[in-house]
């Protein structure tokens, strides 16, 4: 029984009762009961994959549950769409910005709900006045006619929040709202949240930043592996309690054999810094090294700077500082293609968006990054290309009837093996894997881990990132923890424990 069950039901504005959400092959939510309390900041937290976002999508009408019932103000309700949710006072600000950059601030705020009567023109004067007032409420002096594309990242996040404030919202869901905000903008947001709760608005606040949750939250609920874990009043718990409740006690697998040895340093980073348009340091003075045959895992929560660091490494982002690869300096002007030829391979985080060409063959997907290695004068040596593709399919155990099959016909795990194989055909010294197991099943995860070990035993230095504690403990020789753009821990796997890693991931906020 939750300690919050003792609070009277009249203080509950929304209740999700015994909610389950089943997708093919996985149960994202399993009989979860969750309450939102009136006029308060309701914090919800859990590890990656705990079910937070799925539950919020159900409450905001983006998805309908497989089982269970929602109650709004004590009455059973079926929230069939985001529009239906908005009509009943429920708004959600997603972490991914949903703005039209070619439209003005006011046009974005009123998109789909323009002030118009019948066939008369849109009342732009009224829209601009309301837009100006709501942005002033967020302490932003932004012209309503300014194009959103001209705004800084932090300002765009505040425009996204303003979209919910122009309606009569009773429940406002904020999913990682501070991930793109500067410290000054975070303070403004917290002032707005306090103002809203004083007016009776209920806030559902999702964040991985533990100290931030302790500052702004009043009630906290923790999900773990798709199930309700615990709840409490924030003023009665501390960060250590949150960590204990989040982690559980499942055993950690270890894919590494004892007595592993490594070669010389193959990659070194010194003072790497990346600053975004909002003048926030996405990567902040990061320095580290990687040795041949070593697997170094970078653990961090969403917004920690892991992906941004990888983008710096492959030359996809502007940065200051120096990388060296095999004792050769790489500066910010070195192109991505030059870095690949020097020995850096990357498997991106978003396989579908950045990793594969879905209607192209497995063969083409495997070979496209390494065609330069098989270039003879002005033509590709097709025999060498077929041999290299066949070798990669065999070595990585890619399950495919023919190299000419479209890659979109493969399972997620086999698609990921193709993306990894593409990097391997460039013969890298260092392989970067950004969330390599995202979107693949448990069996395929094991295959990917075994592949990583095999590659490291061939002398390839592997740097991979994940927000999954079990994964970081299972496959890392050494663990770096990132938080708010900084490295906050650098420990050998045998000397690491899950609690200390979570504490390190919450530093710097």
Image (spheres, helix red, strand yellow):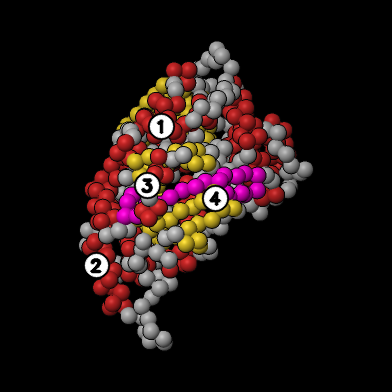
Q: Within the image, what quadrant is residue 159 found in?
A: bottom left
Residue 133 numbered tag: 2
**Foreground: disc 3 or disc 2:** 3
Upstream in sequence: badge 3 or badge 2: 3
* Real-space Cα separation, disc 1 to disc 3, in angstroms: 24 Å
Q: Which residues are magenta?
A: 20-43
Q: Residue at x 27, y 65 (%)?
A: 134
Instruction: Return the residue at label 4.
Output: 19
Residue denoted by label 1: 243
Name the mark nearer the viewer: 1 or 3: 3
- Residue 197 percent across, percent down from the top left: 29, 55
Q: Which residue is mark 3?
A: 7
- Examine the rendering and report whether any part of residue 271 can be seen: yes
Report, in whole angstroms, how far the alpha carbon at label 3 lies from the one at label 2: 36 Å
Foreground tag (4 vs 3) = 3
303 to the left or right of 354: left
Q: Residue furthest top?
A: 259
Residue positioned 62% across, 49% down in the render: 23
């Amino acid at each position: 029984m939750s300690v919050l069950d003792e609070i009277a039901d009249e203080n509950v504005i929304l209740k999700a009762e015994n909610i389950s959400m089943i997708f093919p092959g996985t149960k994202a939510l399993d009989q979860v009961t969750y309450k939102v309390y009136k006029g308060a900041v309701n914090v919800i937290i859990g590890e990656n994959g705990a079910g937070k976002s799925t539950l919020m999508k159900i409450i905001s009408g983006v998805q309908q549950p497989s089982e269970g019932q929602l109650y709004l103000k004590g009455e059973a309700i079926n929230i069939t769409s985001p529009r239906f949710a908005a009509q009943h006072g429920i708004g959600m600000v997603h972490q991914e910005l949903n703005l039209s950059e070619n439209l003005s601030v006011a046009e974005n705020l009123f998109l789909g709900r323009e002030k118009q009567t019948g066939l008369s023109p849109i009342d732009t004067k009224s829209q601009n006045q309301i837009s100006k007032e709501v942005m002033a409420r967020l302490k932003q002096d932004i012209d309503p006619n300014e194009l959103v594309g001209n705004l800084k990242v932090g300002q765009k996040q505040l425009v996204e929040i303003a979209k919910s404030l122009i309606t009569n919202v009773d429940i406002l869901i904020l999913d990682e709202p501070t991930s793109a905000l500067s410290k000054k903008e975070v303070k403004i947001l917290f002032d707005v949240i306090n103002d809203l709760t004083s007016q009776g608005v209920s806030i559902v606040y999702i964040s991985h930043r533990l100290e931030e949750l302790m500052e702004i939250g009043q009630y906290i609920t923790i999900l773990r592996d798709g199930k309700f874990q615990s709840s409490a009043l924030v003023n009665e718990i501390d960060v250590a309690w949150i960590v204990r409740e989040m982690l559980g006690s499942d055993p950690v697998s270890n894919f590494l054999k004892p007595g592993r040895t490594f070669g010389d340093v193959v990659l070194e980073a010194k003072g790497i810094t990346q600053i975004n348009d909002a003048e926030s340091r996405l990567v902040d003075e990061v320095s580290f090294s990687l040795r041949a045959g070593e697997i170094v895992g970078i653990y961090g929560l969403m917004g920690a700077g892991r992906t941004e660091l990888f983008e710096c490494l492959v030359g996809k982002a502007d940065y200051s500082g120096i990388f060296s690869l095999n004792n050769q300096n790489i500066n910010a002007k070195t192109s991505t293609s030059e870095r690949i030829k020097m020995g850096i391979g990357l498997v991106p985080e978003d396989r579908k968006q950045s990793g594969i060409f879905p209607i192209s063959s497995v063969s083409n997907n495997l070979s496209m990054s390494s065609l330069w290695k098989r270039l003879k004068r002005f033509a590709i040596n097709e025999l060498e290309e077929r041999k290299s593709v066949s070798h990669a399919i065999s070595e990585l155990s890619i399950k495919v009837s023919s190299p000419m099959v479209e890659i979109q016909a493969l399972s997620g795990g086999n698609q990921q093996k193709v993306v990894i194989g593409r990097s391997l055909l460039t013969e890298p010294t260092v392989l970067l894997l950004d969330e390599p197991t995202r979107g693949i099943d448990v069996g395929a995860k094991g295959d990917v881990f075994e592949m990583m070990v095999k590659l490291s035993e061939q002398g390839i230095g592997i740097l991979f990132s994940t927000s999954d504690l079990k994964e970081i403990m299972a496959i890392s020789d050494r663990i770096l923890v990132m938080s708010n753009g900084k490295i906050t821990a650098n420990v050998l796997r045998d000397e690491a424990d899950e609690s200390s890693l979570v504490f390190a991931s919450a530093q710097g906020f």
